[in-house]
Amino acid sequence: MCMAIPSRIQTIENGNATVECFGETRVVSLMLLNEAVAPGDYVLVQAGGFAAEKVPADQAEEALAVLADVLAGAAA
Amino acid sequence: MSLAALEGGLTVRLRIVQGRIDAVTIANDRPLDAASALVGKPIADALRLVPLMFSLCGTAQLQAGLGACEAALGIRPSPAQLAARRLLLLAETVGEHGVRILRDWPALLGEPIRAEGIRALRGALSPLRKALYPDDDWAAPGGGRLDPDAGVIAACLTAVRAAARAAIADPSLPRVVKERGLADLCRSHPEPPETGPFARRRDHPLVAPLVARHGNGVLPRLVARLADLDECLAEMDRIVLNPDPGWPAPPHGDGPGHATLEAARGALSHHVTLTDGRIMAWRVEAPPEINFAPDGPLARGLIGPAGGDPVFLARLAVLALDPCVGCEVVVEGV
């Protein structure tokens, strides 16, 4: 609920980024970001396929660890 | 469970019989118990994680969670802290409404997204938190070190007002809705429970006359969002800020605590139970559970003529109610 999952940028091309999260990749638009991003950075991805904001790597990885628990709990 | 299931989403199914939508079912696969992942953690850790997990409306989510923890701990933040939090919450609401109006409204009509306006609005909002709390510790139980920088805040609010008012100047969606005779779309009587900008602003001078003509149809809902944004800007200007060192929180606390606030999309509640400063239970109730309930305003309101493009009608109605997750519309029947 109300979740935008941090995703790691793999490549950037023509204003779009290929991002990865939990082994899944997808292409998102970077057009709404105010700050520059590069491969390796984390961004929050919102409904509609837009990167909403850049997230510091330590925060993103901490969030992903908790969200992995949510995934594991749901699969159990 | 997949990434998509973790993000959650709504599926709206329309059953069409002889040109009428005669049944609407809404599947909500949002992971409602995600907050249970916080169980067992110390309060400080949980509060650090809340905005990372629930990052859409992260400020509202954290304020509701913080308020619930403070209630459980028996802490009453000072008026100065509450005023500063209110300013941050309003800023987030302005930003969320801005994205809806500049991104999703034109997208529904096939018009270009106004990305420059979104970036301008977000850029204007971004200095506010640090201008209030230089140590970025606003979410400490009892409040952080509040030391408002009046000059930066005044400049920030001026820039936000300019960017937001540019955003709401003559948006095309309400005009198109009116021109196509869709103002009453998704109107229902009696009105089911609803939360969000329409519930907050139905008595607003710009909204009330539309409610009189169109009830809870999409046009009053869209205009209510514009009115809500404008009222948020006005309230931000009225908030009086004072320095406050915060309240040192006790390290341990027992019992339940609850907090509800009005986030951009409506009433948001967090419920926690603490034992010895750790989370024993954490539950969240978010606006989509009301607005997209199986017998809620969308499900009831869409019953009626299917028109030439029922998918567009459903998407318009969904957008007027504004879920925070993606929504797929499926048509069944002919």
Image (spheres, rainbow, N blue to C red):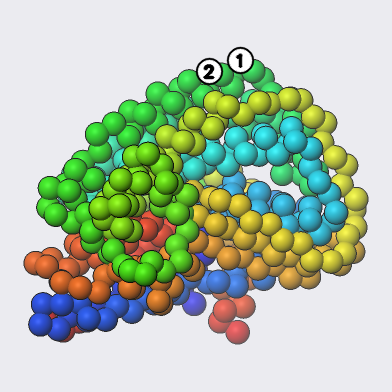
Check disc 1: other Cα within 10 Å, few if <14, some if 14-19, many if 20+. few
Q: Amino acid at mark 2?
A: Ala
- Callout 2 secondary element: helix
Residue occupying image coordinates x 52% and y 23%:
B156
**Which secondary structure lies at badge 1?**
helix
Residue B222 visible in the current orientation: no
Q: Chain of mark 1?
A: B
Q: Chain of mark 2?
A: B
* Labels 1, 2: one chain: yes
Residue displayed at 43% across by 73% down: B293
Picture coordinates of residue A70, whole percent (x, y): 60, 71
Q: Which mark is residue B250?
A: none
Does B88 sit above or below residue B57?
above
Q: Which residue is mark 2?
A: B155
Residue B38, image quadrant: bottom right
The amino acid type, in three-letter code, at marker 1 is: Gly
Q: Where does label 1 land, which residue?
A: B151
